[in-house]
Image (cartoon, helix red, strand yellow):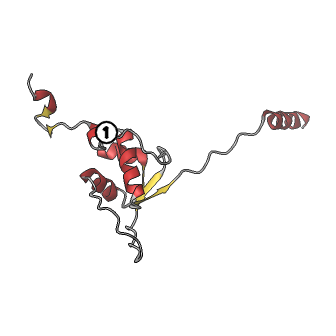
Amino acid sequence: MGGTAWYDDAAGPVVRPYALTGGRTHYDGEEFDLVALIAAADPPAPADDALPAPPWAPEPEHDMILELCRTPLSVAEIASDLELPLGVVRVLLGDLLDHSLIQVRRPAPVAQFPSERVLKEVIDGIRAL
């Protein structure tokens, strides 16, 4: 078998997905919801009095995400378009968010269901009609 397990004739060398994230399996910030919309943002202008930030070299996958997100896409759509696991995409999005290269539009919170008491009162009111 030799080294053939790490090579695909059509695709070339196979890279494990988490090699793209440096072995990180989750983003330490707030969780990215599947339906959160991601949009590319203009890079922030450096402040005159700020210390220079350490250089960050984005991976090609970061650049692909930014290209895709010129129009807002959901996290699930990004993962699907890039054919990468959702966990990997969330880590890559976290990198971009940390560098203010994307904007995240979180979904609206789900409305609370009325209490059982309120539902019973509605049913009683309908029966009274």
Q: Quadrant of the C terminus?
A: top right
Say left or right for 78 vs 37. left
111, above or below 70, in the image: above
Is residue 12 in view from this perspective? yes
Q: Residue at 36% x, 45% y: name it.
A: 89
Q: Quadrant of the N terminus?
A: top left
Of 108 and 57, the residue lying toward us: 57
Say left or right for 25 vs 108. left
**SS at mark 1?**
loop
Is residue 72 in view from this perspective? no
Q: Position of residue 15 (x, y in %)?
A: 21, 38
**Image-quadrant location for residue 18:** top left
Q: Position of residue 102 (x, y in %)?
A: 41, 59
Q: Position of residue 77 (x, y in %)?
A: 39, 46
Graded by Cα atoms within 10 Å as few (under 14), some (14 to 19) or many (20 or more), the crowding at tag 1 reads few
Considering every residue shown, the one lying at the far left of the view is 2
**Image-quadrant location for residue 21:** top left
Amino acid under label 1?
Gly
Residue with the mark numbered 1: 23
61, above or below 100, in the image: above
Considering every residue shown, the one lying at the far bottom of the view is 48
Q: How many numbered circles are shown?
A: 1
Q: Residue at 28% x, 50% y: name it.
A: 61
Q: Residue at 35% x, 64% y: name it.
A: 53
Of 64 and 51, the residue lying toward us: 51
Q: Position of residue 109 (x, y in %)?
A: 61, 48
Q: Residue at 30% x, 46% y: name it.
A: 82
